[in-house]
Amino acid sequence: MTSPQLSATFARQFPNGPEIAVDDLRLGGGVTVLFGASGSGKTTLLRCLAGLERPDRGRILMGETTWFDGARKLWLPARARDVGFVPQDYALFPHLTVARNVAYGLSGLSALERTARVTEALRWLGLEGLEQRRPAELSGGQQQRVALARATVRRPQWLLLDEPFAALDTPTRLRLRGELRQYLRQLAIPTVLVTHDRFEALALGDSVVVLHAGHNVQHGAGHEVFSRPVNLAVAEVTAVETIQPGRVGEIRDGLATVTVGARPLSALAVAGLVPGGDVYVCIRAEDVVLTRAGAEPASARNRLPVTVRSLAPEGPQVRVTLAGDFPLTALLTRSACDELALRPGDTLIALIKTPQVHLIPFTR
Amino acid sequence: MSSAEWQLVGFSLRMALASLLLVLPPGLALAWWLAKFNWPGKTILETLVTLPLVLPPVVTGLVLLELFGRHGPIGGWLHHTLGLDVVFTWRAVVLALAAMSLPLLVRAARTAFEEVDGKYEQLARTLGAGEWRVFFTITLPLARRGILAGILLAFARSLGEFGATIMVAGNIPGQTMTLPLAIYQAVQADDDTHAWLLAGISALIAFAAVFTSEKLLGRRK
């Protein structure tokens, strides 16, 4: 199934709020994650696509169909867009049973077909037996799945999910993340999913669009976006743990030497790099490997003597704050941490592979 | 209770019910319109709708008398084209009760509509529902308790209406005489026993209606 491309260039200004200005956003098949901090305009963008919010100007096209055209005063209302929408709190109709919630969008079908579709959708999502329940009698995870069933049972052209896990507790969230991924794969309906969680974005998105202050600033594969941000704003939105100013030295064979503090680092050269130019050096915490001196493998080109400042457990991982030629953050599994018997004050070697040192030239 | 008293109670209930049916469609439409949209001059309409609540009922009755009298703009038209007379008939009773209960119904229903979270209506639209379907399957069912409470309040108000009714319908036994009018008549005739009996019946019905209305509103919280 080839899905029509969704392309959008539009702006929406709120009286006392920020402006949302999307420039040439193109969404194809698969799952596209809209990633950004709260207030970056993710939800507004999604509501504009759903037809619940009308932009001030610009255009939104879905394949050959015009959803919005400010200049021609065209506006396709939500009910005509054939889009499945799941808001953050699901908005299940509180006065209707699960079965009637799911069947709400099937009013054009015969009663027989309707029942068949509802039954199928509930089975897919493991909701059998809950047909006659009211939304208030369901757990958060069940509510999320009913909302998904209601949005997808019509087989819409696009699926729009606003922070589908925001209303769930952490264990449920982790369990359902895998289920949602599988469900979206099976459905093969092009999907836009809003989140501010990096791991959710990486787990669910075929591609990631980063929103910053209402603008779409980067669009690419998840790993690409999170480890190679195009500018400082993206690096900050995606919470790159270490961002340090540096100066470019030699550039040769696609590699660049850059000095941070007094320490030369080897990195991949990027467009716009000039010898002697200023850059931001970005290093993701999970790309920093710690070893005891003398035990390091030979593959990593960058070796930095560091001292452990503090250890902060984060679920199954430990965030290690390090001091050396420049401040550095590493993210280790708890077992790796135990193996090294890390203590504040320990001196270690931090290893960082060349491709994992990402450079952003100052001018961009 | 004598059969005449039963008849009086029956007539009063029928009149209140008829006025409710008359007021319900335009009242709900108006309430919905006031709850969901803003337009210039909205406050003027809101004020006009609420006016019968605070105006002396006799004044409301006087206005109705002017409008619906045989020489009035509406009453004249009804008389000439449909041969219908309103003033000093049971129709005038229904009209007076409707005018007096409309504000209560509209105010209650408006609040009920406003309390329906717009997110449900928006979601229904993304599922392909048009505005009529959204209203009848989402807005109205979610607002039903508040509306029902308003209906009961309007009904109770109708049963107690005196001033507007006597202006526009008179006090004709068996034709336009409702419970409050009969109580007034009984007191005028020095028949205190009768007056107190009717007063007791009025109080009982009013209590039941308001009690149910409060129950409905309380359960929603």
Image (cartoon, coloured by chain):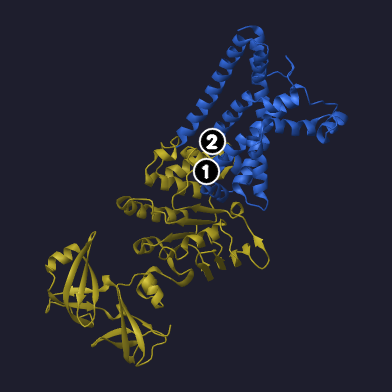
Would you say the residues marked 2 and 1 are in contact, meaning their CB atoms lie under 8 Å apart? yes
Residue B146, label in figure? 2
Tell which subunit mark 2 falls on.
B
Q: Splitting the image into 4 quarters, where does residue B52 fall?
A: top right
Which element carries disc 1, helix, strand or loop?
Answer: loop
Q: Is residue A190 left or right of residue A222?
A: right
Q: Amino acid at mark 1?
A: Glu
Residue position marked by numbered label 1 in the rendering: B115
| Residue A149 percent across, percent down from the top left | 47, 47
Does the rendering let one see residue A188? no
Q: Is residue B180 left or right of residue A105?
A: right
Rendered view: A18 above or below A274: above
Q: Earlier in the sequence, mark 2 or mark 1?
A: 1
Which one is nearer the viewer's eye here, B204 or B126? B204
Does the rendering let one see residue A241? yes
Chain rendered blue? B
Chain rendered yellow? A
Q: Is residue B55 left or right of residue A85?
A: right
Alpha-carbon span between mark 2 and mark 1: 9 Å
